[in-house]
Image (cartoon, helix red, strand yellow):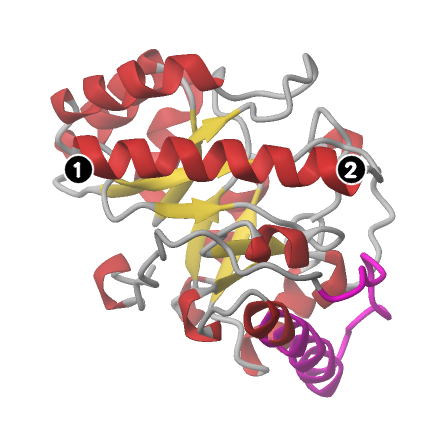
Amino acid sequence: MTDPSSLPSPQPSTAPPAAGSEPAAQPSSAPTATTVEDFRRNLAAVRARIDAAARAAGRDPAEIRLLPVSKTVPEERLRAAWAAGITQMGENKVQEAKRKAANLADLGIHWALIGHLQTNKAKDVAAFADEFQALDSLRVAEALDRRLQAAGRGLDVYVQVNSSGEASKFGLEPDAVADFLAALPAYSALRVRGLMTLAAHTDDADRIRECFRIMRTLRDAGLQAGTVGDGQLSMGMSGDFELAIAGGSTCVRVGQAIFGARPTPDSLYWPANGAE
């Protein structure tokens, strides 16, 4: 398990995104990667897309962190991914993430939990995770803080926002975010880093952009209030991360464009069937 303080911290831009069109949308999945060379190829392709999207938005590509999403991927393939340079991995389900963290402990992977968490799993997350990107409940905040205090460690957290208004998605309603952020200093083991969202599950680019605009507005308000840490924005997945980068994302969560298509339906992991 890596020390989160050793990881680069992209600095969010508060300037409006540059005018102009984003790079054309790309397929959300890549050929299945099984070897180190496969992973290097897919990773290079994703990084090239990130760089192109950043340049099109008038941004520095170094501002944008790539979080590979490794859910459902077998551990032997994750070892190949690590050998190709992937040292951070995002997982949705606590039990799967806990097992992988234990079995791959020799690699020193930075594990980010990006799925919904119930309070009865807080003990597990406090034991292995370096980061939690789906905080949307003070009950969960309290449970995590209690376990983390007992373990003598802290945890980077992002507050999840339901920016699309879709009932099938987890996350706070936008109007509830300011008060929620203001309450989090009571849980001193939680280090608030920013906000996370899943955009609308649609091919309508304008609806997706509106989700990202809402997030940027909430983040900027949090920066002004001093409640959102360094103001990171985790938004954008394999099918929409170019739009997210144009909208100000500092962390894109990419799975199928790196690891290949999954045999398991996304609905098992994401309520709204989004594809990272």
- Say which residue label 2 marks: 266
In terms of image quadrants, where is residue 259? bottom right
User: Taking 244 as reference, is 186 above or below it?
Assistant: above
Which amino acid does the dot numbered 2 rest on? Answer: Asp
Residue 148 in percent (x, y) is at: 21, 33
Closer to us: 177 or 275: 177
Q: Residue furthest front?
A: 19
Which amino acid does the dot numbered 1 rest on? Answer: Ala
Cα distance, mark 1 to mark 2? Answer: 33 Å
Closer to us: 120 or 226: 226
Disc tally is 2
User: Taking 118 as reference, is 73 above or below it?
Assistant: below
Q: Residue at 75% across / 63% down in the picture?
A: 257
Magenta region: which residues?
23-51
- 1 vs 2, front mark: 2
Query: Left of 200 or right of it: where is 66?
Result: left
In terms of image quadrants, where is residue 30? bottom right
Magenta segment: does it hold 28? yes
Quadrant location of the N terminus?
bottom left
User: Taking 268 as reference, is 152 above or below it?
Assistant: below
In terms of image quadrants, where is residue 158? top left
Point out which mark residue 151 bears. 1
> Could you tell me which secondary element the residue under label 2 belongs to?
helix
Residue 184 in percent (x, y) is at: 21, 23
